[in-house]
Image: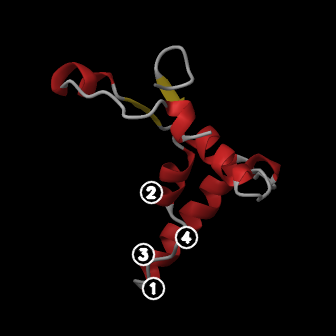
Amino acid sequence: THPHPEGYSIFWKELDEAVVGMGFNSLYSKMALPLFLLRIVAFICDAISAVTGKKLKLGSFTLRMLTIHRWFRITSAQEDLGYEPIVSYKEGWP
């Protein structure tokens, strides 16, 4: 059901395909900052949040959620529940 031979897809690559398919620029064409710099900024934001009591949008947790690799596999649902997709992955996500 997924394009990758092992049966999974990479979240950010699939999201990028959707964004480009809607006519927007690729997510990968945007400016990228080094992870170590973002970690420093997130640490500063966490410190400011601790001092002021206001939650800022960027923090260590938010940065982690934005940078982790996500992939999903449906083999457990197929084996345990007998799930079969109604349409193929390529049909549903061209």
In the picture, the disc for residue 45 is 4
Q: Is residue 71 left or right of residue 29?
A: left
Q: Position of residue 35 (x, y in %)?
A: 67, 47
Task: Name the residue located 60 percent from the left edge and 54 percent from the top edge.
Answer: 39
Tags 1 and 3 touching, CB below 8 Å? yes
Per the model, the C-alpha gap separating discs 1 and 2 is 18 Å
Per the model, the C-alpha gap separating discs 4 and 2 is 11 Å
Q: Earlier in the sequence, mark 3 or mark 4?
A: 4
Please, what is the three-letter code of the amino acid marked with disc 1?
Thr
For numbered disc 2, what is the local secondary structure?
A: helix
Quarter of image, res 90: top right
Q: Which one is in front in this view, the residue at disc 4 or the one at disc 2?
A: 2
Per the model, the C-alpha gap separating discs 1 and 3 is 6 Å
What is the count of numbered marks?
A: 4
Q: Earlier in the sequence, mark 2 or mark 3?
A: 3
Per the model, the C-alpha gap separating discs 2 and 3 is 14 Å
Q: Which one is in front in this view, the residue at disc 1 or the one at disc 2?
A: 2
Q: Position of residue 50 (x, y in %)?
A: 42, 75
Q: Position of residue 88 (x, y in %)?
A: 47, 30
Nearer to us in this view, 6 or 83: 83
Q: For the residue carrying disc 4, how many other residues have a C-alpha within 10 Å: few (<14), some (14-19), or many (20+)?
A: some
Q: Which one is in front in this view, the residue at disc 2 or the one at disc 3?
A: 2
Q: Write down the residue under mark 2.
A: 61
Please, what is the three-letter code of the amino acid marked with disc 3?
Ala
Q: For the residue carrying disc 1, how many other residues have a C-alpha within 10 Å: few (<14), some (14-19), or many (20+)?
A: few
Please, what is the three-letter code of the amino acid marked with disc 4?
Cys
For numbered disc 4, what is the local secondary structure?
A: helix
Q: Write down the residue under mark 3.
A: 50
